[in-house]
Image (cartoon, rainbow, N blue to C red):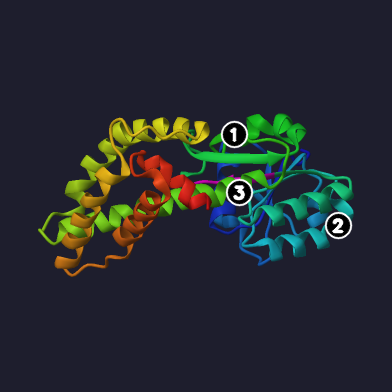
Amino acid sequence: MSVRTSVIGLNSRGAALARAIAAAGHDVVVWDEAGVPAESVEDVRRVDSLQVAFTASLVLMCLEDYDAVQRVLGQAEPHVSADLVNLTSGTSEQAEQAAGWVQARGGHYLDGALMAHPEHVGQPETVLVYSGSREVFQRHQSSLAHLGGATYLGSAPGTAALYDVAMLNFAWATLIGFLQTTALLGTAQVQATTVAPLLTHWLSTTVTEVITDYAHQVDNHRYPGDQEWLELDAPLMDHLINAVRARGLDTALPELIKSLTDRGIDAGHGKDSFASLIEILRS
């Protein structure tokens, strides 16, 4: 049987990709620079030749970094005419450089970002974003759908990598807020598992509505303070800082929020909504 899909790299993410594609019934081979045993993933075959790996109709690459990407592509240079989907994390500039290198050698490049942990690969709700060759995305969309929800962001190869870091920014900011909240409530012996259901419900209802509203405000560059405004929020932030400090916790996060708010007020946004702080972030 001819090879249909190759996975280059058997780190935890690469192994999850191989596992999801194999579970969908694809003929999968794997190649790993470090020699990780293919037996760690069921229903795949290990190949020792990059030339064989790159004869697949679809090559999925997921390595530790772009130094490894450049090293592997250099070894495979005579054989890079395949459709290559690179899910290695990196910068937009690195993705664009890799795309140019592959295209100059007759290959077709699609960059991707997995917005989840390895254990989420293969679940339909898992977010994966792609940019680069539209033809590669269209040819292999059904295969990529076995990894999770596949969203195409356009022909610029660096767009998926930019989404990757931007969405990580959102995740980290949200999660550090969760940790600050649980630390604060923990001073009153409230368990994190007690508050988590309330927070997730609040996120899925009220907070998602606020984000949607703010998105329109940001795109329109108009920040009506009909329901809330910076001068209303600022005293509440002082209350938060005082409560955090009084309980012996780190105040860096609430002080950052208050600092941005104060700068917004000083810039003339005191009567505008919290969304107006994007103007401070842009400056």
Return the residue at label 3. Answer: 162
N-term-proximal mark, 1 vs 2: 2
Q: Nearer the viewer, mark 3 or mark 1?
A: 3
Magenta stretch: give its range: 111-118
Left or right? Give the position of 2 relative to 224: right
Dot placed on the residue nearer the N-terminal end, 3 or 1: 1
Q: Where residue 104 appears, x then y in whole percent?
A: 88, 49
Q: Are marks 3 and 1 in contact (CB under 8 Å)?
A: no
Residue mark closest to the camera, 1 vs 2: 1
Circle 1 sits in a helix, a strand or a loop, which is it?
Answer: strand
What residue would you read off at disc 2? 77
Task: Please determine whether, in this image, residue 256 is positioned above or below residue 133.
Answer: below
Q: Position of residue 108 (x, y in %)?
A: 80, 42
Side of 88 where 253 appears, left or right = left
Using the image as rendered, state which of residue 270 and residue 98 is in the foreground.
Answer: 270
Question: Residue lying furthest left in this view?
Answer: 188
How many residues crowd mark 2 within 10 Å: few (<14), some (14–19), many (20+)? some
Give the residue pinned by disc 1: 151
